[in-house]
Amino acid sequence: MGITIPARLETELRARAEAEGLSVEAYIERLVHADKQGHEELARLAHEGLDSGEPIQAGPDYWHEKHCRLEANLKARV
């Protein structure tokens, strides 16, 4: 399968691949693999968050309390 890309992007891909000692194909393969890993990590973190306990209502009161605790923690460190 052939893919057509703008000359500017091709130049950039070739330069980056060359800088890493890779062919353009290997460099693109590495990018696709990293993208896939990123999506998998995001899905894992989302599931981890969903399984982390009871849901909370994050309204204005929640954020105010969180901010106050953060300020107290920062002051305690100084």
Image (cartoon, helix red, strand yellow):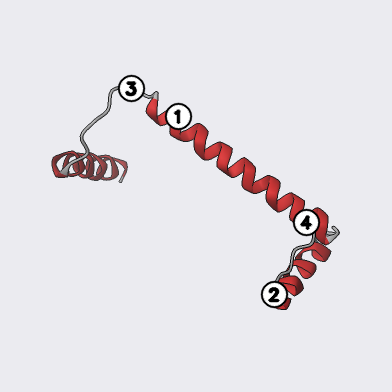
Q: Secondary structure at mark 3?
A: loop
Q: Toward the viewer: 76 or 40? A: 40
Residue 70, above or below 27: above
Residue drawn at point x = 86 percent, y = 59 percent: 23
Circle 2/circle 1 CB separation < 8 Å: no
Amino acid type of disc 2?
Pro
Looking at the image, residue 51 sits to the left or right of residue 66; the answer is right
The first of marks 2 and 1 along the sequence is 2
The first of marks 4 and 1 along the sequence is 4
Looking at the image, residue 40 sits to the left or right of residue 73; the answer is right
Residue drawn at point x = 56 percent, y = 42 percent: 39
What residue does disc 1 label? 47
Identify the mark at residue 6; answer none if there is no mark.
Answer: 2
- Which one is in front in this view, the residue at disc 2 or the one at disc 1? 2
Using the numbered discs, state the Cα–Cα distance from disc 2 to disc 4 in whole angstroms.
17 Å
Using the numbered discs, state the Cα–Cα distance from disc 4 to disc 1 in whole angstroms.
30 Å
Identify the mark at residue 53; answer none if there is no mark.
Answer: 3
Q: Give the position of the N terminus as an image quadrant.
A: bottom right
Q: Residues within 10 Å of mark 4 (few under 14, many from 20)?
A: some
Estimate the x, y position of residue 44 in percent, counting from the top left.
51, 32
Circle 4/circle 3 CB separation < 8 Å: no
Q: Toward the viewer: 10 or 4? A: 4
Circle 4/circle 1 CB separation < 8 Å: no
Estimate the x, y position of residue 56 in percent, counting from the top left.
24, 30
Amino acid type of disc 4?
Tyr
What residue does disc 4 label? 27
Amino acid type of disc 3?
Gly
Estimate the x, y position of residue 41 in percent, counting from the top left.
55, 37
